[in-house]
Every structure is written in C-alpha cells, then in structure tokens.
Amino acid sequence: MALKTSKHGFVIVDKEVGWTSHDVVAKARGIFATKKIGHSGTLDPPATGVLILGVGKATRLLRFLTDLQKEYVATMVIGSETDTLDAEGVTTKTTDHRPTLHDLQESSKNFVGIIDQIPPMVSAVKVQGKRLYELAREGKEIQREPRKVAIHELSISDGLESDVFQLKIKCGSGTYVRSLVSDIAQKAGSLAHVGSLRRTAIGSFNETVANKIEKASLIDLTEGLRDYEMIQVDDKMSDRIRVGAVVHLEEFSHLTTDGPWGIVDLNNNLLAMYEKFKNETLKPAVVLSQEH
C-alpha cells in the first residue's frame, strides 16, 4: 500500500544488485505517492550501496549531494578485460602477467589527485546527442575525450581469492571506478576488470544509515544537506532570502567554508542554498517555495 505524503525530503537507499537507479526511483514513486522523485548519481545494476533520492522540493537540491565526495569498495580481478570493464561483460583480452600487490600499490600512486579519465563506452555520458551506452549497444565504439576527476584517497589490499584484490576509493563526482581499476592494472603491465562494486558513502551518509527502498524513510531538507554549512537568519532576513535577494558577505558573520551555504530560518527550515557572487556578495543558487 502506497504511503500518502505531501512531504519533501531525502531518502537514503541501499540499492540492491540488479536494480537500475531508475528502478529505485520508480519503486519510490509508488511508495511515496508522487512522481516528483530523482536521484543524486547513477549506480549501475551490478553495483550496490548508497543512493540518495530527492522527493518533492528536494529534487531541486540533488546537485548539491551529487557534488559530495563518494566512497567505494571494489574488487579488481586480474588477468582479463571485458567490454564493460566489469564482470557483466564479455572478455575481450587476457594476459598471463600477474602483478604483485606491491606492483599494484605502486601503480595506484599515479592515480591519486586530479587525473584525466576516459569514460567507458558503457557510461551515460552524452556524445553527439547520444549516450555512450546507447552507442555501445549498437556495436559502436567512438573516441572519447578525457575528463578531469578527483581521487582523494586510494588503497589496495589482498582479496579473498587468488588474482583478486580489494580497492577502497574516496573520490569526487564523475569518477568511473571501472576505468580506474583498468587503468591501474594497465599501468602495472596487466589487465583487470571490476568483480564487485559497492558505494559505501556519499558525503557523511554512509551505508550504516541506508535502507532497502521498501524500508526507507524521508529525512528533512536541512538534515539532507548537513554536509554544508548552515546559516540561521532572523525573520527580517528570512523575508529577503525568500525573494532571492543578493546579500553582502559581511551580513553573515563567522562563515567557516567557501560555500555553498544553506540558509535556514529560526525554526531550522531550509529557505535556500546560496553561493558566492561578485564584489563580496552572495546570490541564491536555489530558493525554495515555502508552505503555509
């Protein structure tokens, strides 16, 4: 039975294997009885883990969650490469070269920081009006431009099986773990694909607070954006924020980050997200309509 709701907020989901991110959204639309639901970043069907949904007005705020650091645990299967760079694909190349754990750890040092990464053909990146995975289904492979991605932390350890290693990754938005695994192996003179992949965190929301979609519940807008600094304002300033006024930086004291910032009223209701503008001013990135 669908849960009737007119609320707005975020849902921290633990996506199951085999589900697309769209499948989770479709299921949530039935549970929360609304079509206005989106997600903060795709997880492929074979992957599991944290997927954040936005319900109602929260859909306008999902990009702020997409921008947060992601954490993953993946397995690297040495010795073969597939057309999808994961275990779902067809093997395209094999090698007898087996790098040691030390070899892979040394190779991985080249991939920490801001790096260039070529999106895999099975990604959702659009080229010439079509998504790469659509072209891949047509049997086409086209040249892709490298993209800058941020790898904050990366560690490799022995896995439970021979020729399988475990990676833990903290990275920025837009990182393709499959490509990262393949690139590390190639740098070590071998080939590899992802065996399993799990997203363990988005920002401060880790897998311990995620639930299967059937048991998931809404958290409010302010809690969902807890990774951003919140500025509480009085009633007079609230009225200005509600109409999207540009404000001077000096009107907000004790800011500890470079933004974006959440602006909340005296009852801790989220009014807007603001960001830096020109001449020491802040402008609204998103202003939320208020219900009375």
Image (cartoon, rainbow, N blue to C red):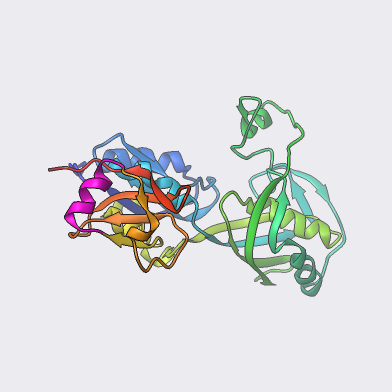
**Image check: 144 left or right of 256?**
right
Depth order, front residue of 111/260: 260
Quadrant the N terminus occupies? top left
Can residue 158 be seen at all in this image of the molecule?
A: no
What residue range appears in magenta? 233-244
Q: Position of residue 190 (x, y in %)?
A: 83, 58
The mark tally for this picture is 0
Q: Position of residue 246 (x, y in %)?
A: 35, 45
Residue in the picture at 63% in, 50% down: 176
Quadrant the C terminus occupies? top left
Asked if the magenta segment contains residue 239, the reply would be yes
**Image check: 104 left or right of 71?**
right
Classify residue 233 by image quadrant. Answer: bottom left
**Image check: 94 left or right of 129?**
right
Classify residue 101 by image quadrant. Answer: bottom right
Depth order, front residue of 106/189: 106
**Image check: 42 left or right of 129?**
left
Residue in the picture at 38% in, 62% down: 229
Can residue 234 be seen at all in this image of the molecule?
A: yes
Q: Position of residue 204 (x, y in %)?
A: 43, 65
Indicate whether 256 appears above or below 184: below
Depth order, front residue of 270/168: 270
Q: Position of residue 253 (x, y in %)?
A: 35, 66
Asked if the magenta segment contains residue 143, the reply would be no
Residue in the picture at 59% in, 48% down: 174
Outermost residue to the left: 292
**Magenta span: chief secondary structure:** helix
